[in-house]
Image (cartoon, rainbow, N blue to C red):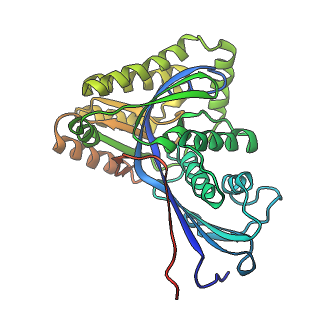
């Protein structure tokens, strides 16, 4: 598939992924209301839209770079290869006089339970928003990204991943009535920010996380138990504990909140903390880690957030042992995102 020599304009966007989602499971329709703490980190998702005159290119070309796939998307047809990308483009629309190539790339591995699909949707919607007059706020982009997953694609999705991708940074989210929420960003002195960044590690177990029968079973049980169920209240409580710990620079307290949340997940269903996750936890404990959080809903595959102790060399020794434990286990380098969704444009040089 050949492209014209130079686009009229190029729109770029980027959005962070999410780790350490204490209070997860409470940002859902069956919880009704919730409290969630999470941290936006890089590596991020990148979107790029190259804009051409309508007669220079098929109207919509999608380049899913991680999959090595470039194809023409015919609008108003069923979702084909990458439903999330296609649904987002359909939802936002493309001006009749333009043709576009949409390129997506994620530095985070697929299926890591770090809100990557939400970051993809947020980055893509932010870029598509630049095609027409008017600008969506970060909150509006997050809600539209959530709506695409739930209403258009009929998937189970809480709200926190889209919010974190849109806002970045460290967040305390209060969902007062699903899906409506307020977001309080946690601002701390640089010394606390840098120290938190130094202590955190993200470990991918090397297998993609997929929604499973375990998750469906947990959802049915929580729906029947109602929003005030003890298990839900336990998870909700970890968000406030995490927020207060970060404000105080109390990393021991943050680690305890992470452990409490992971044990809360285990209480929902033992399979939400997999054997791989448990082995990583054991190695982290042996090296003095203060806390661990199975990211996302938990279950087979996915990743963990680890909060390490005072010693940097102990952290490095821990990471070496974890990656030596299994050829699948991967340390994903991260740093905290100062920003959420970023969108900017360039005009290519002629010739």
**Residue 285 in the image: x percent, y percent?**
28, 31
Residue 175 seen in render: yes
> Residue extending furthest front?
133
> Residue at image x 60%, y 46%?
136
In-front residue for pair 184/241:
184
Q: Which of 98 and 214 is in front in this view?
A: 98
The image quadrant of residue 303 is top left
66 with respect to 191 (left or right): right
Say above or below: 7 vs 267. Answer: below
The residue under the point 66% across, 69% down is 100
**Which residue is farthest bottom?**
351
Q: Where is residue 260 in the image (x, y as percent from the top left)?
A: 40, 21
Q: In which quarter of the image is the N terminus?
A: bottom right
Q: Is residue 114 visible in the rendered structure shown here?
A: no
- Total marks shown come to 0
Q: Which of 296 and 12 is in front in this view?
A: 12
Residue 248 position, x and y percent, is 26, 24
Q: In this view, does 253 lie above or below 155?
A: above
For residue 195, above or below residue 49: above
Relative image position of residue 65 (x, y in whole percent): 56, 66
Residue in view at x 55 percent, y 69 percent? 10
């Amino acid at each position: 598939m050949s492209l014209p020599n130079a686009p009229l304009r190029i729109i770029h966007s980027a959005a962070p992924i999410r780790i350490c989602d204490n209070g997860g499971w409470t940002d859902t329709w069956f919880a009704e209301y919730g409290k969630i703490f999470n941290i936006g980190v890089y590596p991020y998702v990148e979107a790029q839209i190259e804009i051409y005159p309508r007669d220079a290119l098929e109207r919509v070309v999608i380049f899913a770079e991680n999959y090595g796939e470039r194809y023409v998307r015919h609008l108003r047809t069923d979702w084909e290869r990458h439903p999330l990308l296609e649904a987002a483009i359909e939802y936002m629309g493309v001006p009749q006089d333009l043709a576009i190539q949409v390129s997506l790339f994620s530095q985070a591995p697929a299926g890591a339970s770090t809100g990557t699909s939400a970051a993809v949707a947020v980055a893509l919607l932010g870029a598509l928003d630049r095609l027409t007059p008017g600008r969506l706020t970060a909150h509006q982009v997050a809600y539209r990204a959530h709506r695409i997953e739930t209403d258009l694609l009929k998937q189970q999705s809480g709200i926190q991943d889209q919010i974190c991708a849109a806002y970045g940074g460290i967040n305390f989210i209060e969902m007062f009535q699903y899906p409506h929420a307020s977001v309080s960003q946690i601002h701390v002195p640089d010394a606390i920010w840098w120290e938190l960044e130094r202590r955190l590690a993200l470990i991918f177990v090397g297998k993609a996380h997929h929604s499973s029968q375990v998750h469906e079973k947990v959802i049915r049980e929580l729906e029947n138990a109602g929003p005030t169920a003890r298990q839900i209240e336990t998870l909700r409580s970890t968000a406030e504990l995490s927020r207060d710990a970060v404000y105080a620079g109390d990393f021991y307290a943050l680690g305890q909140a992470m452990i409490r949340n992971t044990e809360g997940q285990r209480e929902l269903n033992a399979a939400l903390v997999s054997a791989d996750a448990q082995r990583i936890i054991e190695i982290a404990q042996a090296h003095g880690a203060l806390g661990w959080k199975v990211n996302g809903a938990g279950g087979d595959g996915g990743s963990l957030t680890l909060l390490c102790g005072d010693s940097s060399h102990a952290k490095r020794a821990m990471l070496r042992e974890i990656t030596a434990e299994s050829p699948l286990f991967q340390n994903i380098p991260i740093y905290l995102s100062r920003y959420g969704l970023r969108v900017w444009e360039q005009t290519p040089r002629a010739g």
